[in-house]
Amino acid sequence: MNSILHFVQPILPLNHTRTSTSPPAHDSLTAVSAGKHPHAPLRNTTSEKKPKKQDDYHSTLKALNSRGRFPRKSLGQHYMLNASINEELVAAADVKEGDVVLEIGPGTGSLTNVLVNAGATVLAIEKDPYMAALVRERFAGLNRVEVVANIPFNISTDVVKRLLPLGDIFSEVILLLQDEAALRLVDSSLKSSEHRPINIFVNFYSDPEYKIKVSRTNFFPEPKVDAAIVAFKLKQPVNYPHVSSVKTFFSMVNSAFNGKRKMLRKSLQHICPSPDIEAALSAANLPPTSRPEELTLQDFVNLHNLIVTT
């Protein structure tokens, strides 16, 4: 069975693990929620169907209790307790291996489970962020999908910024990029004029690898530059560097590089006083005269966690 499970945002706007009862900010961009980004295509690459436990009254209540949830009247939530009804639904639709199915409101994933077992590609839309997170976790065992693309050079940075944070969806992103840009993106060397915030971003979310150079003569019309294939092996969210806030982390990094060649104790003064920055640099085993291009990803992580309060 080769089935792919996709969780995507609805086209029309709708009202996006941890022990907290509230989903984290990044969950608004994950799973089957109605957030800003499409999420979680997954693939079951096993050669045959694996029997999965059928959903019943007890398993449904257990799933809801795991999130401290009750059916919400405002969302019209009524969860299916009889797995045989889901089987009837799938049979009525005559779902077969390779079919593409749009599921609206997967809830606890009981119908999704039957659809996936039938070999369907499922596009599930869920308004409730708690149920979105639950279904994403339930099907986390399925392999993620790769992205392979030959994109216009002039949008490469934007595409990289959009795709790399989707490690809970994609396992790898392989892009054909302008050669010069490719070299910059994978270069993690320090004290280079090419060391920029994008390098921190790329290494925060992935392990990049420059594959091969592609001559400009392979294109029509022929561009003025060569290209290159770059593979970004995406990290899953649990493997991201630990920062108290991803948003404030990248805000700090951008501020640091806005004052390129400036010492961090100057460029980050809007975050905290210079003496505090120097103390944090010392605690992170960095000289007080450090500049942004001299810091590794981990250095920035350590500095952020010392000076930024959220």
Image (cartoon, grey):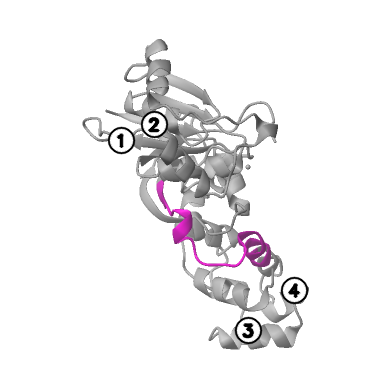
Which tag, 2 or 1, sits closer to the chain's start?
1
Residue underneath mark 1: 52
Give the class, few, some or many, for how many residues have Cα within 10 Å of label 4's Cα (few <14, many ≥20).
some
Q: Residue at x 44, y 60 (%)?
A: 239
- Is residue 258 located in the magenta-colored stretch of the structure? no
The dot on residue 170 is none
Kind of residue indicated by mark 1? Lys
In the rendered image, residue 277, in percent from the top left (x then y), is placed at 68, 82
Give the class, few, some or many, for how many residues have Cα within 10 Å of label 3's Cα (few <14, many ≥20).
many
Which tag, 1 or 3, sits closer to the chain's start?
1
The dot on residue 271 is 4
Which tag, 3 or 2, sits closer to the chain's start?
2
**Image quadrant for the C terminus?**
bottom right
Tag 3 secondary structure: helix
Kind of residue indicated by mark 3? Ala
Q: Going by the image, does 169 lie left or right of 72?
A: left
Q: Nearer the viewer, residue 41 or 21?
A: 21
Q: Which residues are magenta?
A: 230-253
Tag 4 secondary structure: loop
Residue underneath mark 2: 113
